[in-house]
Image (cartoon, coloured by chain):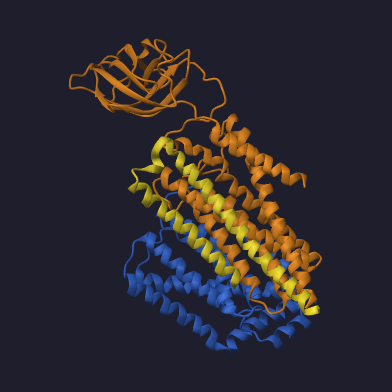
Chain colours: A orange, B yellow, C blue
Amino acid sequence: MWWKITSVLLLVYTFTLGMLVPLRPGILTVSPESGLTRQSTVLTISGYNAHFTQGEGQTRVWLTYDDENAILAHRVKALSDTQLEAEFQLPANLPKGEATMVLNCIVDNPADGTSVLPNAFQLKLDSTTMQEYDPTWKAHPVEKLNVKKGFTYPYRNVIYETIRNTYFHVPMWFVLLFLLLASATYSVIYLLNPKPEYDSKASAYAETGLLFGLLGLVTGMLWAHYAWGKAWSNDIKQITTAVALLIYMAYFILRSSFDEPEKGARLSAVYNIFAFATLIPLLYVVPRMFASLHPGATGSPAFGGQDLDNTMRAVFYPAIIGWTLLGFWMTSLRIRAKRIEDKLGGLD
Amino acid sequence: MKFFKTRIFFIIVLFGALYLCPANAYAAGDFMRETGKINVVVGVILLLFFGIVAYLIRLERKLTKLEHQINDDHEWKN
Amino acid sequence: MKWLVFKTLLHKEFLLEFRQRYAISGIVLYVFSMVFVVYIASVRVQPPVWNILFWLIMLFVSINAVVKSFVQESGSRQLYYYQVANPVVLLLTKIIYNTLLLLVISALAFGTYSIVAGNPVFDYPLFALVLLLGSFGFSITFTFTASIAAKANNSATLMAILSFPIIIPILLTLMRLSNIALRVIQDTSYQRDIINLLAIDAILLTLTFVLFPYIWRD
C-alpha cells in the first residue's frame, strides 16, 4: 500500500514542479545576424523569460570569439522586458586573421543572470584589411557575471520548454527496463519452480513493459518532430526501442501459439529470458557504435552528466521512481485480474 | 488473438493522433511552436494519459467479462 | 562416453544431410535464386547497398538453412534422441554443424553475389572474419529459435517472428564491420566492435546451453 501512495505523491511532485518551475532566462534571437568589421551596428536582442527593464543600466552585452576575445556593447537600451537594443563598434579585424567568423552573444544583468546564444552573429572582414591585432578584442573581457538565484530549469536553444519532457518521456525508458527485468525474473522463477502463477506474472509484466515502451516511443516521436524536425529520424535509440517492442510482441505471439498451457508457459519463459538477454546488447552495446541525436550520444547509452543540472536531477530521479511504481501498480491490477480468471477457469 | 486486435487498434489510434497533430499545428499558425514549444510538453502528457487510460479500459473490459462469468455461474447453480 | 555420443551425433548430422540431398540442393538453389532476384532488381550497386543486400540474402538463406535442424526432424526421431543423448551434447552438435553449413553457404553466397553484382571488398581478412563470426552468431540464435518454434503450432511463421528481432543486434554489428571491410566507413578501432560481437555471441551461447534442457524436456 505504502508504495502506491509513494507513487502518487512522487508523480504529483513531478507534475507540479515539472510544469510550474520556470525556465531560466535566455536569448531567443539576435538580429541582424551578420555585419562587417569597422562598422557600428545596433543589435536587437529578444529574450525569453527575461526582465531587461529591471536591470536597466546594469545590463551588459558581449559578442564573444573565444574565452579571451570579446567585444562589449557601448550602449545598451531595454525596449521592453524581452527586447533589448545593443550598439557595438565592431573591431577592425578578427583575432586570428580569419575572413569570417561566427560569434556568440552573451547578455548579463543582475535580474536574469547570464544568458548565452551560441553562433548568434556572423562577423565578416570588410575589404580593407589590417594586419596587426586589434586590441579592442581584449579591452573588455567577459567577467563579473551575475548568477540567477532561484529554482529554474536550464534554457536550451531549439528545445526551450520541452526540456520538461525529461520528466515525462525519459522515465518511460526506465520503466520499460524495470518492468521487463521483473518479467524476465519471473520467467526464471517459473523455470525453477513451474507454478502457473509465476508465468502469468511474467506475461503481465511484459504487457505493461510493452505499453510503456510504446508510450516512450510515441512521446519521443512527438518530441522529435519539434526538436529534430522529423518524427522518425532513424536515430539508433529509436530503432533499438522499436526492435525491443518487436521482440516482446513476438513473445506474445509465441504465448498464444501452443495448445498445451504448460508447454507454452515453459517455452515462452525460455524465450523471455533469451529476449531480455538480447535486449542488453541492444540497449547498451549497439547504441555506442552509432551516432545518435539523443543527449549523451555516442559513448553512453543514458544521460551524460552535463545534460542534467542539479535542479533537474531533483525532479528527474523522483519522476523515474514515481513512474516505475505506477507501472508496477498497473501490473499488480492485471495480475489480480489474471488470478481471478484462472480461479474461474478452474471452476468450470 | 483478441489481445492483438485491441493492441493493434491502440497502436493505430496513438500513431494516428501523432500524425494528425503536426498537420493541425501547421494549419493553426504553429500552435505547437508558440511560447517556447510548451504545447509539445502538453502533447506528451496527453499521449501518456491516453495510453494509460487505454490500458485501464482494456482491464475494465476483462473484469466485466469476469463479473459476467461469476453471475452466470451463480444463476446456473440456483 | 560423451565424446563418443558427440562424434556419433555430428556424424549423423552430416550423414543426414548427405542422404537427403534435396535439402542441401534446395538451400543452394535458394541462394542462387535469391542472388538472381537481387541482381535483376538492382544490377550493379554501390558498396553501401551491396552490403545491405548481401546481409539480407544471408539472413533469409540462413534462416531457411537452420530451420530444418529441428523443425524438419520428425517427432518420433526427436523422442529417440531424447532417450539416447544428453541435450547439451545434442545442441552442441547442432550448433557446430549449422555453423559449418552457414560458412559454406556464406562463401557460396559471396561467390555468386560478387559475380553478378560486383565485388567491392577491400579488406579480405576482415571480411572473412566477419563471415565467420556472422555464421557463428546466426547459427546460435537460429538454432535456439528453431528449437522453440519446432515445439509450437505454426513453426515456419513463428521461426521468422522469433528470430528477426533477436538477430538485430548481431546483424547491425555485422553490417557495420563489413562496411569497414568495404571501406564504406573509415574506422581504425573496429577491434572494439569485434569484441562486442564476440561478447554478444558468448552471452547467447551460454544462455542457449543453460536454457536448452528446458526446451528439450517434454
Q: Answer with left or right where residue A119 lies relative to residue A196.
A: left
Front one among A157 and A218:
A218
- Residue C190 is at least partly visible in this image: no
Q: Quadrant of residue B56?
A: bottom right
Above or below C154: residue C212: above
Q: Quadrant of residue A9?
A: top right
What x and y, as percent, mark residue C218? 76, 78
Instruction: State how many labels appear.
Output: 0
Residue at x 62% of width, y 53% of height: A176
Q: Answer with left or right where residue A82 lies relative to residue C71.
A: left
Which quadrant is home to the C terminus of chain A?
A: bottom right
Q: Answer with left or right where residue A180 lies relative to residue A190.
A: left
Q: Quadrant of residue C29?
A: bottom left
Residue at x 69% of width, y 86% of height: C75
- Residue A131 is at least partly visible in this image: yes
What x and y, as percent, mark residue A168? 56, 44
What x and y, as percent, mark residue A277? 65, 58
Above or below C171: residue C12: below
Residue at x 63% of width, y 33% of height: A314
